[in-house]
Image: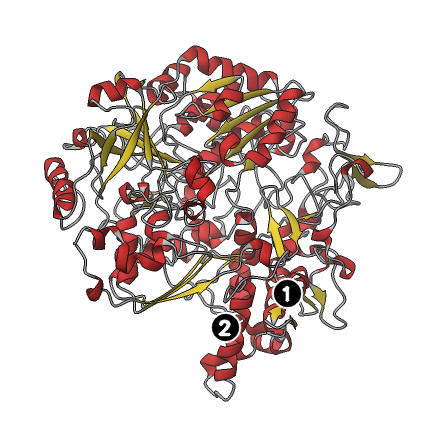
Amino acid sequence: MANSDCIIIEGSNMAECHPVGFQWVMEAKARGATVIHVDPRFTRTSAMADIHVRLRSGSDIAFLGGLINYVLSNKLEFREYVVAYTNAPTILRADFEDADDLGGLFSGYDAEGRHYDQGSWQYEGVGTSAAAGSRAMSGEKRGRETSAGDTHGGHGATIGEGEIESDPTLEHPRCVFQVLKRHYARYTPEMVERVCGIAPDTFLRVAEEITRNSGRERTTAFAYAVGWTHQTKGVQIIRAASILQLLLGNMGRPGGGIMALRGHASIQGSTDISTLFNTLPGYIPSPEATAHPTLEEFVADNSSATGFWGNMRAYTVSLLKAWWGDAATAENDFCFDYIPKITGDHGNYQSVMDMIDGKVRGYFLWGENPAVGTANGRMQRKGLAALDWLVVRDNVMIDSASFWKDGPEVLEGEWKTEDIGTEVFFMPAATYVEKDGSFTNTQRLVQWHSKAVEPPGDCRSDLHFAYHLGRLLRERLAASTDERDRPLLDLTWDYPTEGPMQEPNAEAVLAEISGYAVGDRRPLGAYTELTDDGATASGCWIYCGAYAEGVNQAARRKPGQEQNAVALEWAWAWPNNRRLLYNRASADPEGRPWSERKKYVWWDAEAGKWTGEDVPDFEGTKRPDYIPPKDARAQDAISGTDPFVMQADGRGWLYAPSGLVDGPLPTHYEPQESPIDNPMYKVQSNPTRELHVRPENPFNPSGSEPGSEVYPFVLTTFRLTEHHTAGGMSRTLPFLSELMPEMFVEVSPQLAEFRRLEHAGWATIVTARSAIEARVLVTPRMAPLTVDGRVVHQIGLPYHWGGNGLVPGDSANDLLHSALDANVHIMETKASTADIIPGRRPRGPALRALVEAYQRRAGITKETGTR
């Protein structure tokens, strides 16, 4: 980012929420970069930006779509880059119909099942891909085994077999470029103003800045956080940014790209290794129970014929060997049967509903505080209260460990402690300074940290808890002859331990994750060494090489003045220590840098290899003029001019023929709860969004639905520097608590006058789920917007408070619903609706009476939670 000429921060208050990373934004600004902040609130990030763009929460795609239209209608795309490196020339099937033609829907929509048949989305001349035609897409409703996003993990979706037809002139009416132009033609500056509330002159100023700072000589970067992801169309917002960046030639180049900002030190690492139900380590998809009875069927359904995902079998077999060692053989499918298979949606919200319904009896909480930290806190607590047992591992007694005695429902007299049967086991956890391990940061950099002090008392590291829990279970089952116990008993559970606490050696775990040759335990140096015959083992293929040559690469600390600015000897980045993904795109098709100013990697014809500032994200000796033979597979089928080597066609996808459940092109839909009707299409909200329609999860009426006037204001949440996530740690610290002592709500002076709210006084915020109270902060940082011809007010709430700690307060998450992005099962915390009135909320039974009175006025039924 320090090399950027322009930086757009949208969906993030980077200065306050990611201050360590924000230093590089300031470095770029000091070098002359333009900084643009797009956010409903004026924050400390806005104060440091050259341009602040205030938009309505939930309208990001309309804004980004307007920028795409500006680029295309003014012929400002980086044409050579677009033709050579994207699928812009690719011709689509004749039966594809765009949302522009169908009032907001794409061809193939099944209204009853609320899903798409993606057959018509495919390329001309290519058969239906496995992802588009798999069982997961067969027409089941929410009970289907997985979404399309789940069927291919985190990697680029497959495309069908056949000869892709294309038009490099970009004139064919069905080529992606022309489809893109038609799709975004309605996203004019006037429409952006109508949907987002952004004045046309402000919009045009942003458009001019990003186009002026893109091309051969200059690059623009995007940075986002949960302001984008926490929406019912979050994946498509990010896709819209990627389309814009591909059109402008900003992907794979220094100072370009899209930076996904992580809120914790190792959120990136937790998804890499993987704490998600629908992926295995390295973004390998989780097998499905009915679709993947064998390893071969799993690989066939998830491999791409071309690109590096063509090595799916090698990555999967190496993972199985790391987990089950000698027990994993070719004869027993390398213990593929041992992997738990997906039988439905096993995400957080579905699990909570299953708790309420008696389907889940026990639960582990590791570093989570759902009682106050997850949307619809009341439903979360109801799920916890329905369990037989709950294990909580945390540094402090968080709200989720004590909800049975001091949760809001108990304190208000609605629930009685003696009626809650959940047995809670609180296991005190060591902090990061009390254990060895690694963090993977927002740019995939794996950095080692060493234990500074021993953990006090009974506190233990997560590694200690997991290892010894597994050890004890294995000891108890040692004499078992039951086949269902074999997966646990056959695990390679032999990590060395150290000291009086028998702490497992964290480097030994990293070494296993990195990988080794099975025969002689030789550490592997790169994922390209992995094989599909059981000769290699790796606990996460993208981390292969993190322990190359038997050295902890993550622990490297070579000073910056002793190496170049890319700093390849400071820690280690996956994959293969590359610091910039797809950096082959920083050179033109012949392998020459697009410009001297932005040179990064290039082809050295004399040496016969790729070289440059970074590790090339390309096969090192593949010539730019390499043309794959007809029968080539995997990476051998990627030509010397196709830089996006993880994609099946080696190109950046402006249009996604498969892999997304809600459309091949980002399209503006209103949030689940909105104060207005969709001005762009007849379809109000994302048609494939994941809805949990049940009494515990009522929805506010939206748009022009009767009752929507009961909840007239936009509600969004945000975080503070002084508090951390759900506040479990920071609310127990006196210095941080003193800095931010109370839950508060930000409102504009206009809204304060309209609702008679007093600065520093109290306000009650109400939704169909609950009502909370907060101190009022009247501030011009919040301002009303004119949207679709009417004034729309927005309310901002930090989400760090709960009932425990030195500075307790009501939880913002109690107000929020569970409607999710269908691709990744993420909730919509950034754009819902609410009412706000002066004064403190009621206590006791009067609290529920207030919420239910609002529901009756809005016509919400208790039976379904909807009108």
Closer to viewer: mark 1 or mark 2: 2
Q: Is residue 168 visible?
A: no
Residue 732 at x, y percent in the picture: 42, 48
| Disc number placed over residue 469 in the picture, else none | 2
Furthest-right residue in this view: 606
For label 1, the SS is: helix
For badge 2, the amino acid type reads Leu
Residue 471 at x, y percent in the picture: 54, 76
For label 2, the SS is: helix
Badge 2: few (under 14), some or many (20 or more) residues near its Cα, within 10 Å?
A: few
Residue name at image x 50 percent, y 67 percent: 458
Indicate the quadrant where residue 413 lies.
bottom left
Residue holding disc 1: 318
In which quadrant will I find the N terminus? top right
Q: Is residue 82 left or right of residue 356?
A: right
| Relative vertical location of residue 650 with respect to residue 129 in this rendering, above or below | above
Residue name at image x 47 percent, y 48 percent: 128
